[in-house]
Amino acid sequence: MGECKKMALVSVSDKTGLEKLAKGLESHGFELISTGGTAKAIEKAGVKVTLVEVFTGFPEMLDGRVKTLHPKIHAGILADRSKKEHMSTIKKQGISAIDLVVVNLYPFRETISKKNVSLEDAIENIDIGGPTIIRAAAKNNKAVAVVTSPSQYEQVLSELKEKGAISAETRKKLAAKAFELTAAYDATISGFLHNKFLSEEKFPQSLSLSFEKAQVLRYGENWHQEACFYKDVISTSCGIGDAEQLHGKEISFNNINDANAAIELVKEFEETAVVIIKHANPCGTAVNANLSVAFKNALACDSTSAFGSVIALNRECDVATAEQIAAFFNEIVIAPSFEKKALDVLKKKKNLRIMLLPCLGKKKTEPGLEVKAVEGGVLVQTKDLLLLNDGELKVVSKRKPSEKELKDLLFGWKIAKHTKSNAIVLVKDLASVGVGAGQMSRIDATEIAVKKSNGRHKGSVLASDAFFPFRDNVDLAAKSGITAIIQPGGSIKDEEVIKAADEHNIVLVFTGVRHFRH
């Protein structure tokens, strides 16, 4: 690296492993340059260190905002060792080449994650010198190694011990990691400030997303696909990324997708609720003041499809509910808490993934953007958070809904919102009794929902995520003993559909809102 002496610039917010690193670098002949708190920690470890202000001949200033932003630092990092002109220039200026940069950044993400953080505190934790140094060192990776995480210290010290230097291959990899870090750091800041200052601009001209690798998964949607789970680093919503696994097999790609669907649906309900999800569709949903009764009713919707399902509860899991869950094979149970005895019952199932999500039942889904990858780009839209109340409905049939029918219609509407389109949901007594999901034809979805109900469709109500294009759905509903229908309306055949409802004395309610889910 350096021609005469090896120089390392060390300036870190996270002091983890710093003592071992400093001693290791000193033992391998590095002279250390450092800033304020880092320098004190290095001195405390008994390692000689030169303060940056002594090295540059220029004091730290502006409450530490300006420390390393100096030509003597950046020229020492950026000088191309293969160019005589570069090397003669820095020699003429009395600048030493810097061979190793160890920098991690101000904890911006951690700062904005704190409750009631002030804008002033957030701004003060935007690192300027750190990213600048990291980028400079990463750019000049032919000569300079850039270390941005304590997790990298061991590899660097091992190479120095074994080879006396950090290899070109390692420097390249460290540089790539460094640019990943600064890109994610800037994306986090950008997202935070966009929400603060440009909230009216829902879709920025350049979309920068910041996600952190949380878990490497065994495989993806299929065994031959590789997969990983990344968490949104600044999300304050209540989601699968916040869940803690208490027991069971390692969670999979499909588990996470299904768990997300279960969580988002159960969050729709203020009442005690149970959601059972299979292949991202609700195969059973119910509310009841008694959780175990809610579970029994949800399971009764489609106990066959519930085999291998994901279950979400928005109340503490009690023993009676746990015993029902443990009575058949399912992949995951998610709840805000578990009674100790309930946990004991569930843990008897060796592979059952038990997930703790304390915010469930307390937090709703927060506004924001949904991103879906397509080949060559992403589709971005605002989240579908629109809900209805009975005052926003338009009863277009001659017969008006009873209070019971209205409650069931609104309950079914929430479930249809979370069911893959074309979606038909049959509901009776605040529990789904039949679901037809993901069909190319709406009449097919209706037929499937009726078939799935195993005769429980009589006296139920029907929720459809989009309008009826023809009267055939109404005719089938009447034939099946369904008493009321809720759907968006808006078809060119609305009059024909309304006429069919009146002929069959079925309640027909229009929402004016569609809930496609693809």
Image (tube, rainbow, N blue to C red):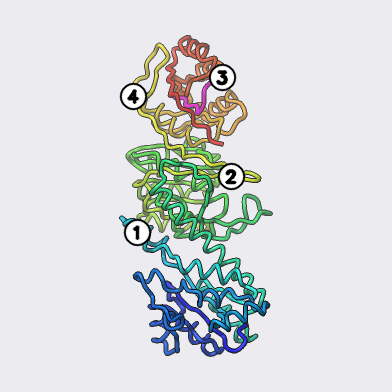
Type of amino acid at the residue the image marks with label 3: Pro
- Mark 4 or 3 closer to N-term? 4
Side (left or right) of 161 relative to 263:
right
376 in relation to 352, above or below:
above
How many angstroms separate mark 2 from mark 4 (CA)?
37 Å
Secondary structure at numbered mark 2: strand
How many angstroms separate mark 4 from mark 1 (CA)?
39 Å
How many angstroms separate mark 2 from mark 3 (CA)?
30 Å
Where does residue 175 sit, x and y in percent of width and height?
60, 69
Secondary structure at numbered mark 4: helix
Where does residue 139 sit, x and y in percent of width and height?
60, 68
On residue 378, the disc is 2
Toward the viewer: 69 or 366?
69
How many angstroms separate mark 1 from mark 2 (CA)?
30 Å
Pointer 1: what residue?
114
Where does residue 13 sit, x and y in percent of width and height?
42, 72
Can residue 346 be seen at all in this image of the molecule? no
On residue 469, the disc is 3
Which dot, 3 or 1, sits closer to the camera?
1
- The magenta stretch is 461-468
